Image: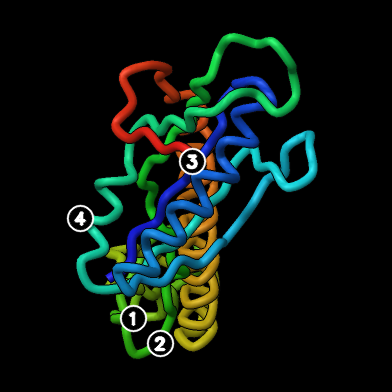
Amino acid sequence: MTVRLLLSAGRGPQECSWALAHLLRRLEADAARQRLRVHRLDTVAGDRPGTYRSVLVDIHGAGVEAFAASWTGTLCWQAPSPYRAGVGRKNWYVTAQPCPADTDVTPFEESDVEIVACRTGGPGGQHRNKASTAVRATHRPSGLVVVVDTERQFSLNRRIALRLLRQRLARRDDAAARHAITDRWHLHDRLVRGNPTRVERP
């Protein structure tokens, strides 16, 4: 079982990026104690060395859902600022939210495509009207359907139909991937300061 978490400092000050680095190490240590594996997929560095604006992680292992739930929500690192002397504030907030895994590329196998010969009307002569040269191709896993009657030969229409199905599946996969990335970036704005679900200290 795998859970993907996005940890983000949101729009907070540089101390939040520093806090995120500490909380990430604390999460990884906690996971190791529970025999879970944490894999960093993507990191966005903060302004200071060793700090992060955001980190995307996959957490693997038995019981990962309960573990991830304990690290989801507003996290607080409670410590004085290492950058600004005399700052009274000691609570630095980070958000940790589950996010969907990357969308899979839809596999395309010709064996998954149902090809049906059909007749079409319109211009093209007597042969086109009487012979079943048009093609209706259905990609069964996705339900996508294309009808091709541009050529007078069934084999050519079949080849075009398969190419069109591949192109439409690729466009659909690309759109789904862009949507997932957009949703992920919206998580950065969900940081609620105060009332943390978890407080950690040095």
Q: Is 196 on the left-hand or right-hand side of 13?
A: left
Please give the label number shown on residue 66.
4
Residue type, label 3: Arg
Please give the label number shown on residue 32.
none
Provide the residue designation for mark 3.
184
Query: Which mark is in front, 2 or 4?
Result: 4
Residue type, label 1: Val
CA gap, disc 2 to disc 3? 34 Å
Sequence-wise, the earlier of marks 4 and 3 is 4
Sequence-wise, the earlier of marks 4 and 1 is 4
CA gap, disc 1 to disc 3? 33 Å
Q: Secondary structure at mark 4?
A: helix
Q: Residue at x 54, y 55 (%)?
A: 174
Q: Secondary structure at mark 3?
A: helix
Q: Residue at x 78, y 34 (%)?
A: 47
Q: Residue at x 46, y 55 (%)?
A: 172
Total marks placed: 4
Provide the residue designation for mark 1.
113
Residue type, label 4: Ala
Provide the residue designation for mark 2.
110
Q: Is 116 on the left-hand or right-hand side of 149?
A: left
Q: Position of residue 46 (x, y in %)?
A: 72, 37
Q: Position of residue 181 (x, y in %)?
A: 53, 45
Q: Is 47 on the left-hand or right-hand side of 134?
A: right
Q: Find out whether the residues at labels 2 and 3 contact each other: C-beta distance under 8 Å.
A: no
